[in-house]
């Protein structure tokens, strides 16, 4: 396969961790005979510094012309003024909007050897393997909002709204993902209170009944789901939900494995390139020290191969190699629990060696 990839290292530890993912992709390319043509572009704070905008036209053009995009992280104290009109995260939001990335996929699968790093008891976290599918371009974050005065009192409002097609396309995507996994799909809403959720529930049920009747399908209210995630997370497979509920539940879910440095995510659209990234930020406190954990970004590159390039075997190999390196006891500082640790590049080298040996 010949694929065009855009790499967006961004800020802080971004360049360090993306460099390791690039090495891993190159090792996969060599092993399987694929040519991954990587073009590196600027985004976020570093792009503001060099060209005055967090999403330069050149970056957007390169992204549009590529098969997939791998991002490190954006932001940092230098650009943190909340009142500034130009901010690093506008680069990321701009990319999602321009590329119409309506679905955010976040797998939550704690690694066996790191189970004790979880804030939950081992018996609760064991066997957890959830794929969150969050709607990313609709709902309350994109509805009408504003303020008004009434009889001397100020009111503020944010409108939650979903259309049938918006719900249908995200539920369809989640259902297809469930078919390729354990066949279980849970839709999360607040249908006991919200009209937008009642339309969500009705549309989701129609989609599943019409085209995915073989799935083990269920619904949960978002408040109950927040509890189930802590009390019985292993019971869930694919979980599909709207923008705001997904925002909150995926952050809750990201705490289950006990380390931010291990979790990848993807944002994908109906067609065109997907955007793959670790869920953590730019970690300015450790940037430049060579100690950041590159595994979330390496695992994001595996998701990229699976979802954008349809290279399932290659993606699985990266995931197995990461598992093997952890099984052998290698740890970066964030997952070492005070024990001996290795640096970013060394961790990347170990994964590359594993790939070459398989
Ligand atoms: P953060 O995720 O960058 O860091 C939180 C803590 O986790 C820090 O102690 C950091 O050292 C550690 N950490 C994170 N990733 C790590 C890794 N790979 N290896 C080892 N340790 C790691 O969150 P924050 O400190 O709240 O935010 C820092 C900056 O990142 C802010 O400017 C924020 O806006 C930005 N941010 C960007 C994204 C993104 O680009 N998608 C996401 C979240 C935050």
Image (cartoon, rainbow, N blue to C red):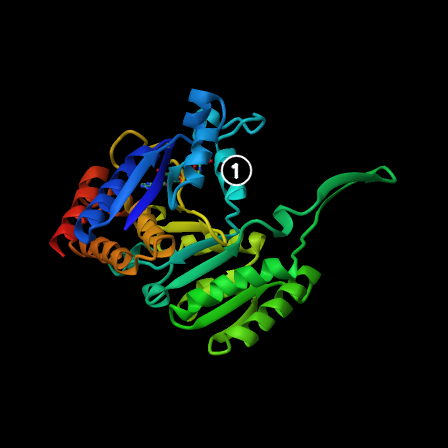
From the viewer's side, name the closer residue of 97 and 161.
97
Left or right of 191, for residue 323: left
Q: Is residue 343 above or below residue 139?
A: above
Res. 148 image quadrant: top right
From the viewer's side, name the closer residue of 57 and 19.
57
Please indicate, yes or no, whether residue 167 appears anywhere in the rendered image.
yes
Residue positioned 64% across, 69% down in the render: 202
Q: Could you tell me residue 81's position as x and y percent?
A: 53, 26
Q: Is residue 217 above or below residue 250?
A: below
Left or right of 202, for residue 146: right
Residue positioned 54% across, 66% down in the render: 187
Q: Residues within 10 Å of mark 1 (few under 14, many from 20)?
A: some
Residue positioned 34% across, 57% down in the render: 310
Residue positioned 20% across, 51% down in the render: 33
Q: Could you tell me residue 327's position as x and y percent?
A: 19, 57
Mark 1 highlights which residue?
94
Q: Secondary structure at mark 1?
A: helix
From the viewer's side, name the closer residue of 190 and 205.
205
Q: Is residue 327 above or below residue 231?
A: above
Position of the C terminus, as image quadrant, is bottom left
Please indicate, yes or no, whether residue 293 appears anywhere in the rendered image.
no
Q: Could you tell me residue 143's position as x and y percent?
A: 67, 47
Q: Is mark 1 within 8 Å of ligand 1?
A: no
Total marks in image? 1
């Amino acid at each position: 396969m010949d694929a065009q990839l855009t790499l967006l290292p961004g800020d802080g530890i971004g360049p360090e961790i993306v460099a390791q993912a690039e090495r891993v992709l190159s090792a996969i390319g060599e092993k399987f005979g694929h040519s991954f043509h990587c073009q590196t572009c600027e985004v976020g704070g570093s792009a503001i510094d060099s060209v005055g905008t967090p999403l330069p036209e050149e970056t957007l053009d390169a992204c549009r012309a590529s098969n997939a995009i791998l991002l490190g992280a954006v932001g940092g104290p230098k650009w943190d003024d909340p009142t500034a009109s130009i901010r690093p995260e506008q680069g990321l939001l701009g990319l999602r909007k321009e590329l119409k990335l309506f679905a955010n996929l976040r797998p939550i699968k704690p690694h066996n050897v790191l189970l004790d790093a979880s804030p939950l008891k081992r018996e609760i976290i064991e066997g957890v393997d959830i794929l969150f599918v969050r709607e990313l371009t609709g709902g309350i974050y994109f509805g009408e909002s504003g303020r008004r005065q009434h009889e001397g009192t100020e009111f503020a409002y944010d409108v939650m709204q979903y259309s049938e097609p918006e719900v249908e396309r995200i539920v369809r995507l989640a259902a297809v993902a469930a078919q390729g996994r354990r066949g279980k799909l849970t839709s999360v809403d607040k249908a006991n209170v919200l009209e937008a959720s009642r339309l969500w529930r009705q549309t989701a049920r129609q989609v599943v009944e019409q085209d995915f009747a073989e799935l083990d399908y269920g619904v949960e209210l978002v408040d109950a789901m927040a509890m189930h995630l802590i009390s019985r997370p292993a019971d869930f497979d694919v979980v599909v939900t709207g923008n705001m509920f997904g925002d909150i539940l995926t952050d809750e879910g990201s705490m289950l494995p006990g380390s931010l440095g291990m979790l990848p995510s993807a944002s994908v659209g109906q067609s065109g390139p997907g955007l793959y990234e670790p869920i953590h930020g730019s970690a300015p406190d450790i940037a430049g020290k060579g100690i950041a954990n590159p595994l979330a970004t390496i695992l994001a590159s595996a998701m990229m191969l699976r979802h954008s390039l349809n290279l399932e075997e290659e993606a699985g190999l990266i995931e197995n190699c990461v598992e093997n390196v952890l099984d052998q006891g290698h740890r970066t500082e964030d997952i070492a629990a005070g024990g001996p640790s290795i640096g970013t590049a060394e961790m990347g080298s170990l994964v590359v060696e594993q790939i070459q040996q398989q």
